[in-house]
Amino acid sequence: MITIKADCEMVARTTNRKQHKRSPYPLRKWSRRGRAVADFACGAAVSIGEHVLSAIALVVHSTLNGVRGWRSRRPQESHSAQQIATSTGNSITNTVDVFQPLRLERPNVRFDDIVGLEDAKREIELRMVLPLRHPEKAKRYGIRQGGGLLLYGPPGTGKTMLAKAVASELDAAFYHIRPSDIMSGQVGEAEKNIARLFETLHRQPRAVLFLDEIESLVPSRKRNGSTIMQRVISQILGEVDGLEKKPDAHVLFLIGATNEPGMIDSAMLRPGRLDTKIHVGPPNAAARRRLFQTLLADRPVADDVNADQLAARTDGLTGAEIKELIGKAADDAFIESVSTGIPCPLTCEGFHRCLQTIK
């Protein structure tokens, strides 16, 4: 309070010394008014608090300096009205603030590189690959190029690998999108991200859009009452329906992946959207044996290690879990080799010990 009164009196004395050209009142009168307001501020401090008192002091300061009123402050225009990402060769130059994770990929994995999943690969090839490789026959039989399918199954079974193989087989641009890439804390920003995403896709002659964890992007509206998600779902459905209106020169393949297909909104699974559903489960015995043979080919292995026995012991494990098992066994053998100074191969006992930590 004492400080504010001193400030006001200092302002009044300053005004008394300087002639203000625009002031219609005598300087002495302004000085008296400044002191009066300062005295009033000090007396009101007990009841109205320091914050209001500071505001009064600011008013006095502005008035004594010839300011006719408060300056209206305009909010600065947001410069986050982002441009749409454009493609440059095999890379993406992205100028979007919120939607930075958009990246173009050119996978080099093909169906022959994927161990097992023969039924899934055959169904995907029939729905997506063959119509584009044989366009005349596809047109004659009324088979549409592009379209969508849903890959569902437990984590680590190869859904992402299958989607990348589709892009590689078709020489198409590949976009891997997760829910965190789309959703935003700002109202309406998620819908804008979706619109930007699909506009970017339409600039590619061929593109594969892989929507990972799609149950979080298009959840069932019966179970989710969020108004934000209602708008997001409507935006996605509208963009997917608009794919059929695009010229034939632009072919877009939409692939969704989920661990919980029952959580997806039923509208997303209607014909023309993700109407083809393909289960991607753990590898069978033959696929597990081939996976062990492939991953152990360049590692030192003891004579008691047998791919058939390992395949029999790992029934129910996914491909990712089998890779983890081999990695742990290799780590143990490497540490023992470093500590003893003697080369130590991967042993059957080591695999059995590591298997207990995974199952």
Image (spheres, grey):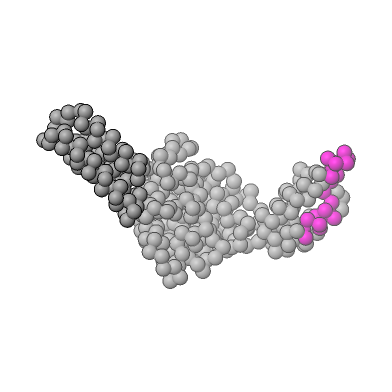
338 in magenta: yes
Using the image as rendered, state which of residue 220 and residue 348 is in the foreground. 220
Name the residue: 44% across, 68% down.
Answer: 224
Q: Which residues are magenta?
A: 336-356
Is 17 left or right of 307, judged from the image as shown?
Answer: left
53 in magenta: no
Name the residue: 66% across, 54% down.
Answer: 320
Q: Position of residue 26 (x, y in %)?
A: 13, 34
Rendering quarter of residue 306: bottom right
Name the residue: 64% across, 48% down.
Answer: 113
Q: Position of residue 293 (x, y in %)?
A: 75, 50
Does residue 345 sit above or below 214 in this rendering?
Answer: above
Q: Position of residue 335 (x, y in %)?
A: 81, 44
Is 18 left or right of 134, judged from the image as shown?
Answer: left
Quadrant containing the N terminus in the rendered view: top left
Is 268 left or right of 247, judged from the image as shown?
Answer: right
